[in-house]
Image: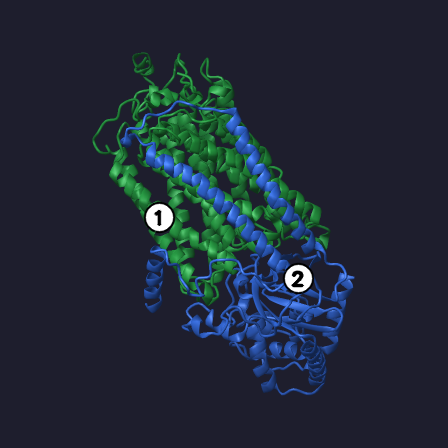
Chain colours: A blue, B green
């Protein structure tokens, strides 16, 4: 209600031509934080003003005519109906204007295309519905999904006011971290369907296409957090796979890289130890929420006709090995999670599905038992790409 | 003159069939035109209801009404219904009604095929609508059907593919019929360069349709075999390429959007001179501009795909080629303005809709030019900016002109005058609300809101709410249009219109030389005098 009142207040302000000072009523393209994004902004403004100018001229003539050349004012119709001279003039003038636009546009286009001599490369893979980042020079590799708070609030009828969630739908569990003032080359591909990686502050978006590699580059001037979204319809959760890029100065970035390496070590040692069933189930609940619930639903009931229910499913309640193989390798629309989950997450989510969501099989899967299978599946994946 | 024409047709005693059978077996171009128009109007409300589901869900952030998958189905079906169910059939309906009487022909050249193409349209529309009730839901991958996503569609996929085939065959038959009619059935003296522009633009449109519908049918057939027969046209794992589909689709898709706008140009060029009481400015250049736009539409398709990762030479070529479209389009806008200049204008509902069309379509053209600039499109692409762009070129353009055409010709068809006061109310409600609906979407796109999302970050909330309010006003205003049309058919204001309806209209085009309402059969003998006012003759 308050929002509606605000809205009408704003509308009436605009009506008297005062416009609005509220930041939420953003009107224009952002300038962004790279040289290219600023060039694009300048191009955008140039063309916008040319259009505004032409619009004022053409509509000005038209409205003058509408006002003065009306029958009710007794204006008699002239009978002229063609003039080759005029037609030629209004063909040539737009052509000249277009050439004037094409020159700066071509320059920026060539600049955008220039991905050579990059300082580092990051491979970005689009998945339904998350992003995978691989730092090709540093052996850092992780997935980035919608943060938990947004994910809870965005469920139909969640009752949570999105305004209370910080960065609603534009926040992730693990952001992409990049150093400032370095030329970073991105390599884009996709695992399932088309996606498009777009951070407006960087000035561009690029489609990610299964089986193909696309390139783009950026060099961010100032440290900060920049947010974006998937821009190519990729299925039901297309609106829920945001992108967060944190640009850090080089020393901070180096520190972050170190932290990642330490975390990776800890993770592999965790997989080696014995886990209790309760530990696995409670860990599995989070893994399920982040990876499985978007299709099989939070309660495991699935979506009839598209995504099968896990509650009472013959696969989940049957042989352990069958379920492991299915989750490992995928089938049809089910992605191969062997490439996405580490051993602990994999074992815990399997254990969770077998002992929750209305199932009660009773067994548990140890991380150590799946480690070798996972290593194989991830190697296979790399062989395929080679 | 009018004595010669009036009454010469009825002697044959060929009235319409009695009862419902009249509408099923009819081969009369006027009956079939009516069937097309009624279908289009019905589908306009179906597609509009879907749009309102979309705008209701987007009224506030958070999901309130529908699941994301159903939202995507609504986005997809709204587009399919509006393009293939509303706009295209409406123009075919107008073509059926008006082309024979405008060129002095007794009927369409192929009347039985005319009937068949209408009923195939109905079959196609029923088939695509039936997917809404199928397991797995209606297609939800967007009207562009991009693979691999579209291959995840449930049971609906083959139905959607075969519906496209039916709609395509229907369109091709309609197009063949229009070309055959224009080439063979013109009255003596009605040379090509004397034809009204509506006829010209439809002829060019018909050629576009014949060229592109088979391409679309081929593309969706490849989807079908990829899904069911293990081919890999669009699957990289089997040596195919998902982007190949996009190239094929947009080779169809770009001319397709011109299929929806060229007849619009033709109608505007017909109505504006009548109410400016002046010949159309630059008839010849209008014909050439239309043909140039049609030609260019075949060589610019990849501007829908600037972000798929084309070689830079490709990006530059498609940018330059796309910018060229601004030239003939500009010529058209200048010609319409010059037609109004020093006219003696009156502002009945058809003229009001035409003026709104020229202004708002030009704004859609401007954003089109902005998106032609490839580097800038790296920001605009797949955002609400493009949603705003193409709705400006479709709603206040094609749809407004369809409204204008209805008000312009309905008195001719029925012999009754519509209620001008209500029609003006309808115009102002539509013209204001369409801008409340679509103008803020420019801002949303520039601020970074992607298209086809059911929920959005809170900074987009305010403009979305305004847009949704505009959508509901616009949607419900169209019920007024329905009321006006029904009221006119049932007798209107009670005022019987003259043969001419609009002042001096008979100088512009042949239909105004016939009695109102138009008799069931017209021009059984061809007219002897061809109006040339639109050429500046007398």
Can see residue A204? Answer: no
SS under mark 2 = loop
CB contact under 8 Å: marks 1 and 2:
no
| Mark linked to residue B182 | none
Decide if residue B345 is on the left or right side of residue B90: left
At which x and y percent is residue B356?
Answer: 39, 40
Pinpoint the chain carrying mark 1: B
Q: CA distance from mark 1 to mark 2?
A: 45 Å
- The answer to which of A179 and B250 lies nearer the viewer is A179
Image position of B531 with respect to B472: above or below: above
Mark closer to the observer (1, 2): 1
- The answer to which of A73 and A376 lies nearer the viewer is A73
Q: Quadrant of residue A123?
A: bottom right
Q: Are marks 1 and 2 on the same chain?
A: no
At which x and y percent is residue A364?
Answer: 63, 82
Q: Which residue does the image show at 68% across and 45% down from the upper left?
A: B314
- The answer to which of A230 and B351 lies nearer the viewer is B351
Decide if residue B47 is on the left or right side of residue A201: left
Residue located beneath label 2 in the image: A191
Q: Which residue does the image show at 41% across and 69% down from the upper left?
A: A157
Decide if residue A366 is on the left or right side of residue B509: right
For the image, the number of numbered tags is 2
- The answer to which of A86 and B309 lies nearer the viewer is A86
At which x and y percent is residue B446?
Answer: 51, 57
Q: Quadrant of residue B498?
A: top left
At which x and y percent is residue B482?
Answer: 31, 41
Task: Classify mark 1: residues with Cα within 10 Å, few (<14), some (14-19) or many (20+).
Answer: few
Image position of B360 with respect to A310: above or below: above
Q: Which residue does the image show at 53% across and 65% down from the upper left?
A: A240
Residue located beneath label 1 in the image: B432
């Amino acid at each position: 209600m308050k929002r509606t009142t605000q809205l009408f207040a704003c509308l009436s302000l605009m009506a008297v031509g005062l416009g609005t000072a509220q930041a939420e009523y953003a009107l224009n393209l952002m300038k962004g934080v790279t040289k290219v994004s600023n060039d694009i902004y300048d191009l955008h403004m140039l063309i916008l003003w040319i259009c505004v100018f032409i619009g004022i001229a053409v509509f000005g003539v038209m409205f003058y005519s509408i006002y003065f050349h009306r029958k009710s004012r007794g204006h008699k119709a002239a009978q002229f109906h063609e003039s080759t001279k005029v037609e030629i003039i209004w063909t040539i003038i737009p052509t000249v204007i277009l050439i004037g636009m094409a020159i700066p546009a071509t320059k920026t286009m060539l600049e955008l295309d220039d991905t050579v001599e990059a300082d580092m490369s990051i491979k970005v893979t689009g998945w339904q519905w998350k992003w995978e980042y691989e730092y090709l020079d540093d052996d850092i590799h992780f997935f980035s999904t919608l943060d938990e708070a947004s994910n809870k609030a965005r469920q139909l009828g969640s009752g949570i006011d999105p305004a209370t969630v910080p960065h609603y739908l534009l926040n992730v569990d693990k952001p992409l971290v990049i150093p400032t003032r370095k030329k970073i080359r991105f390599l884009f591909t996709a695992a399932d369907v088309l996606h498009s990686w777009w951070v407006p502050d960087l000035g561009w978006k690029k489609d990610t296409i299964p089986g193909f590699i696309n390139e783009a580059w950026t060099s961010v001037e100032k440290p900060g957090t920049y947010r974006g979204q998937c821009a190519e319809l990729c299925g039901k959760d297309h609106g829920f796979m945001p992108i967060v890029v944190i640009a850090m100065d080089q020393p901070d970035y180096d520190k972050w890289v170190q932290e990642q390496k330490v975390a990776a070590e800890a993770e592999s040692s965790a997989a080696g130890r014995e886990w209790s069933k309760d530990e696995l189930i409670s860990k599995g609940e989070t893994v399920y929420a982040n990876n499985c619930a978007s299709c099989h639903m939070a309660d495991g009931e699935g979506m009839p006709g598209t995504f099968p229910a896990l509650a009472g499913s013959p696969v989940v309640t049957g042989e352990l090995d069958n379920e492991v193989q299915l989750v490992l390798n995928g089938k049809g629309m089910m992605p191969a999670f062997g490439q996405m989950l580490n051993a602990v997450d994999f074992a815990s989510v399997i254990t969770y599905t077998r002992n929750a969501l209305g199932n009660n099989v009773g067994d548990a899967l140890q991380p150590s038992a799946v480690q070798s299978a996972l290593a194989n599946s991830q190697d296979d994946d790399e062989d395929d790409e080679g | 003159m009018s004595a010669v024409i009036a009454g010469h047709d009825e002697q044959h005693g060929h009235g319409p069939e009695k009862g419902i059978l009249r509408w099923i077996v009819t081969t009369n171009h006027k009956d079939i035109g009516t069937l097309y128009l009624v279908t289009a109007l019905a589908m306009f409300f179906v597609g509009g209801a879907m749009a309102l589901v979309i705008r209701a869900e987007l009224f506030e952030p958070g999901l309130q009404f529908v699941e994301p998958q159903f939202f995507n189905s609504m986005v997809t079906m709204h587009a399919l219904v509006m393009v293939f169910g509303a706009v295209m059939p409406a123009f075919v309906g107008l073509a059926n009604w008006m082309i024979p009487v405008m060129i002095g022909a007794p009927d369409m050249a192929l009347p039985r095929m005319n009937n068949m193409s209408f009923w195939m349209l109905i079959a196609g529309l029923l088939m695509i609508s039936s997917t809404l009730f199928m397991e797995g839901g209606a297609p939800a991958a967007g009207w562009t059907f991009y693979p691999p996503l579209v291959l995840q569609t449930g049971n609906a996929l083959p139905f959607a593919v075969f519906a496209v085939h039916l709609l395509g065959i229907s369109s091709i038959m309609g197009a063949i019929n229009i070309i055959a009619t224009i080439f063979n059935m013109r009255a003596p003296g009605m040379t090509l360069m004397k034809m009204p522009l509506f006829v010209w633009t439809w002829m060019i449109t018909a050629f576009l349709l014949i060229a592109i519908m088979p391409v679309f049918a081929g593309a969706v057939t490849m989807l079908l075999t990829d899904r069911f027969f293990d081919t890999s046209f669009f699957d990289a794992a089997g040596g195919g390429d998902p982007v190949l589909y996009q190239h094929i689709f947009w080779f169809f898709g770009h001319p397709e959007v011109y299929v929806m706008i060229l007849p619009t140009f033709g109608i505007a060029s017909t109505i504006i001179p009548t109410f400016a009481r002046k010949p159309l400015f630059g008839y010849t250049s209008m014909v050439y501009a239309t043909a140039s736009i049609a030609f260019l539409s075949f060589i610019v398709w990849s501007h829908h795909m600037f972000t798929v990762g084309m070689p830079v030479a490709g990006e530059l070529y498609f940018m330059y080629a796309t910018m060229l479209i601004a030239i003939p389009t500009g010529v058209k806008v200048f010609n319409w303005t010059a037609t109004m200049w020093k006219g003696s204008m009156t502002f009945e509902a058809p003229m009001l809709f035409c003026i709104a069309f020229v202004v708002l379509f030009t704004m859609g053209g401007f954003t089109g030019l902005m998106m032609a600039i490839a580097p800038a499109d790296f920001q605009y692409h797949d955002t609400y900016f493009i949603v705003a762009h193409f709705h400006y070129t479709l709603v206040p353009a094609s749809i407004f002109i369809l409204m204008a055409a209805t008000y312009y010709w309905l008195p001719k068809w029925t012999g009754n005058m519509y209620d001008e006061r209500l029609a003006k109310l309808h115009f102002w409600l539509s013209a204001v609300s369409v801008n409340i609906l679509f103008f803020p979407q420019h801002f949303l796109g520039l601020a970074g809101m992607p298209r086809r999302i059911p929920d959005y970050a809170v900074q987009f909330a305010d403009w979305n709410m305004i847009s949704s309010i505009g959508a509901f006003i616009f949607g419900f205003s169209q019920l007024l249009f329905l009321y006006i049309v029904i009221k006119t058919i049932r007798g209107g204001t009670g005022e019987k219109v003259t043969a001419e309806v609009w002042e001096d209209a008979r100088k512009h085009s042949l239909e105004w030389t016939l009695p109102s309402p138009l008799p069931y059969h017209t021009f059984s003998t061809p007219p002897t005098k061809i109006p040339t006012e639109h050429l500046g003759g007398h």
